[in-house]
Image: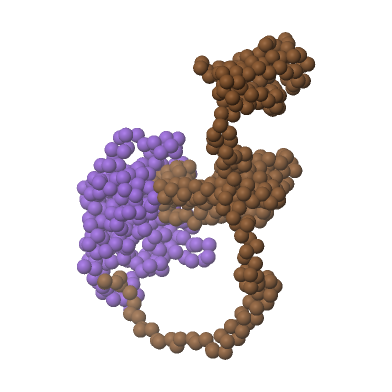
Chain colours: A purple, B brown
């Protein structure tokens, strides 16, 4: 099975200023699942995702990816594990002045010996792989364009292509469509959904819109002020649960 | 556009706008008037002088717009012959066929000897002169002559006590007419300007070599932890101190250290530029977008790979822009750094001004203007292509 299994146990993250971003969060993700994380801004969604690949160091608790304790890995082993975890970001996080191709190739850096990449030399088969991935997300013709000359949706597709270069078994998506319009949001999530369905890559994706969660997720967890307040299927979120997650005054608004 | 699920909000209350009281403004204007009136007096501004004394500057301006560039030199026919003190071998001299020739009674000899010099193939009935050119290259007039109707002449002279062993005797005949030659001023200024251009180039390049690594040490976001913070503090302070010292002062110090000349100028420019570039570079490093760093770290890249692919592409274009900006400034500074002994055209300019040789000064000023304008254009072109 291609997808990774993820297990989070009693994860706690307290920032130096005292903010308790994650408070005893535990859940499990089966291989091939499309898990959606919802919650208000500041509820801990981004922190949770970054604790899974240790871009942020958890204060306590454990994260297991395929029974490997991520939180206890030494730096070299962590880097090797990160190779298999692709990540896409709300702000795309591309290198603006570099070409699309260079941005995508950078996704393969974990697999290349350091000396090679330092001279901006990528083997021909890697370049071919990059172009193939760009083809897959439909922007192969933009390969030589500067990254900051693309639209938001195109930039996120470059982000996806970059993640695909890692041949990941797990994809972490941190509010990937929060900066995009409704139509583009659907198009991006469809790409991710296709990767999840056809290749069995496990996806953990944080989203704002419940309607998107209902449409694309196979399971949903909700965070509120760092605590897990809901875990279940998307259609199980009725009005009462909705208010529990988002607060008493909340009103659900549809995204077209 | 449909918003996310948010709690209901209360509409905002209208806030009253603040107003400046009229007499506060009046007080401010009066205060400014007092300050500027005093300033006018202290700086001794006298607009009347500007108008009435304008004619005083007319001769100066007239000279400044007529730089000393070329001189008319009489057209010459020239021939040379080699002569040496025994036992040295006289230098061979090229004699193009059909041209004028100079023949010596003997190509070797001793000081005090009699030497018969014969010339042929020159223009007829013209005046000319013979010059000795000794081994050091300096020339001295030996004798005057006149060519006959066939363009020949003969002169007897005594061999003088020349410096060195191997010399040349040169015959120059005026054939009438004038030739345009670069003036001595132009030759001097041209040589010094080349020195000036390279002053700026070498100074800037040396500065870049040191500034780039130093800038990483002076970047707050890279220097973390107790050791890092200490290093950051030290490097930043040193750079700030160096930046406040005027390059002209530095040039004076270096002129005493390594002697007056372009080396002192290069050192002064380099030292000041390291400080300035170091600060600019490090500020750029501190303001990079952390997003790409996060993204590339997440792919499992090593720290060096992260720097190469996430940090460097963000800082290279601004680095180049800053370097070019610094190069511009250094070109301007290198033109004046000669005034304190730093080599380049500045010293020449100062000399001409002190001797009230305005036309010569004009040559230097025009040359400086040209160079600065050319460098401006070049740097803008580079900036456009790269950044």
Image point (60%, 86%), residue name: B27
Please state which of residues B114 and B212 is positioned toward the viewer in this rendering: B114
Label count reads 0
Residue B345 at least partly seen? yes
Image point (57%, 43%), residue name: B69
Q: Quadrant of residue B169?
A: top right
Quadrant including the C terminus of chain A: bottom left
Q: Position of residue B132 (x, y in %)?
A: 69, 23
Image point (65%, 74%), residue name: B40
Q: Quadrant of residue B84?
A: top right
Image point (68%, 40%), residue name: B261
**Is A149 situated above or below A76?**
below
Q: Is residue A244 left or right of residue B150?
A: left
Q: Position of residue A62 (x, y in %)?
A: 43, 53
Residue B228 at least partly seen? no
Please state which of residues A180 and B332 is positioned toward the viewer in this rendering: B332
Please state which of residues B43 and A68 is positioned toward the viewer in this rendering: B43
Q: Is residue B289 left or right of residue B22?
A: left
Quadrant including the N terminus of chain A: top left
Q: Is residue B242 left or right of residue A14?
A: right
Please state which of residues B270 and B114 is positioned toward the viewer in this rendering: B114
Q: Position of residue B18 (x, y in %)?
A: 49, 86
Q: Position of residue A232 (x, y in %)?
A: 28, 63
């Amino acid at each position: 099975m291609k997808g990774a299994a993820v297990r989070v146990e009693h994860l706690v993250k307290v920032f130096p200023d005292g903010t308790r971003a994650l408070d005893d969060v535990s859940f499990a993700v089966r291989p091939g699942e499309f898990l959606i994380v919802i919650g208000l801004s500041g509820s801990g969604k981004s922190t949770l995702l970054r604790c899974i690949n240790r871009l942020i160091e958890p204060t306590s608790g454990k994260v297991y990816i395929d029974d490997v304790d991520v939180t206890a890995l030494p730096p070299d082993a962590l880097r090797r594990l990160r190779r298999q975890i692709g990540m896409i970001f709300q702000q795309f996080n591309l290198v603006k002045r570099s070409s699309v191709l260079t941005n995508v190739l950078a996704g393969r850096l974990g697999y290349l010996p350091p000396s090679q990449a330092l001279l901006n030399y990528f083997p021909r088969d890697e370049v071919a792989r990059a172009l193939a991935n760009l083809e897959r997300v439909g922007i192969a013709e933009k390969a030589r364009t500067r990254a900051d000359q693309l639209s938001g949706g195109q930039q996120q597709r470059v982000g996806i292509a970059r993640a695909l270069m890692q041949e990941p078994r797990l994809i972490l998506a941190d509010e990937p469509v929060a900066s995009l319009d409704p139509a583009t949001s659907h198009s991006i999530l469809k790409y991710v959904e296709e990767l999840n369905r056809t290749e069995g890559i496990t996806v953990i994706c944080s989203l704002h819109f419940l309607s998107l969660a209902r449409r694309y997720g196979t399971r949903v967890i909700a965070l509120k002020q760092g605590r897990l307040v809901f875990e279940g299927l998307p259609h199980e979120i009725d009005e009462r649960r909705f208010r529990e997650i988002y607060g008493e005054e909340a009103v659900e608004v549809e995204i077209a | 556009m449909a918003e996310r699920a948010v709690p209901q909000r209360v509409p905002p209350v209208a806030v009253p706008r603040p107003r400046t009281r009229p007499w506060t403004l009046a007080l401010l204007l009066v205060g400014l008037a007092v300050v500027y009136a005093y300033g006018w007096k202290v700086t001794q501004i006298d607009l009347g002088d500007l108008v009435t004394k304008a004619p005083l500057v007319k001769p100066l301006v007239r000279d400044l717009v007529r730089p000393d560039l070329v001189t008319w030199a009489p057209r010459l026919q020239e021939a040379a012959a080699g002569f040496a003190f025994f036992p040295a071998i006289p230098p061979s001299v090229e004699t193009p066929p059909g041209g004028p020739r100079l023949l010596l009674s003997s190509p070797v000899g001793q000081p005090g000897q009699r030497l018969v010099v014969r010339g042929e193939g020159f223009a007829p009935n013209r005046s000319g002169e013979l010059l000795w050119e000794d081994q050091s290259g300096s020339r001295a007039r030996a004798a005057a002559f006149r060519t006959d109707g066939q363009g020949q002449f003969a002169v007897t002279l005594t061999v003088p006590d020349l410096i060195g062993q191997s010399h040349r005797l040169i015959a120059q005949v005026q054939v009438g007419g004038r030739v345009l030659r670069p003036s001595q001023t132009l030759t001097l200024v041209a040589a010094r300007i080349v020195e000036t251009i390279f002053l700026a180039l070498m100074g800037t390049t040396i500065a870049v070599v040191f500034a780039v690594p130093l800038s990483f040490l002076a970047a707050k976001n890279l220097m973390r932890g107790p050791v890092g913070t200490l290093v950051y503090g030290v490097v930043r302070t040193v750079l700030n101190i160096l930046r406040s010292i005027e390059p002209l002062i530095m040039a004076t110090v270096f002129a005493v250290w390594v002697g007056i000349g372009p080396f002192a100028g290069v050192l002064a420019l380099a030292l000041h530029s390291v400080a300035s570039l170091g600060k600019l570079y490090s500020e750029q490093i501190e303001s990079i977008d952390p997003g790409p760093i996060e993204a590339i770290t997440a792919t499992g890249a090593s720290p060096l790979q992260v720097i190469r692919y996430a940090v460097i592409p963000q800082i290279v274009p601004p680095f180049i822009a800053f370097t070019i900006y610094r190069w511009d400034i250094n070109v301007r500074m290198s033109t004046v750094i000669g005034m304190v002994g730093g080599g380049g055209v500045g010293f020449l300019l100062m000399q001409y001004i002190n001797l009230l040789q305005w036309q010569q000064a004009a040559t230097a000023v025009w040359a400086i203007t040209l160079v600065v304008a050319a460098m401006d254009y070049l740097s803008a072109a580079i900036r456009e292509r790269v950044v």
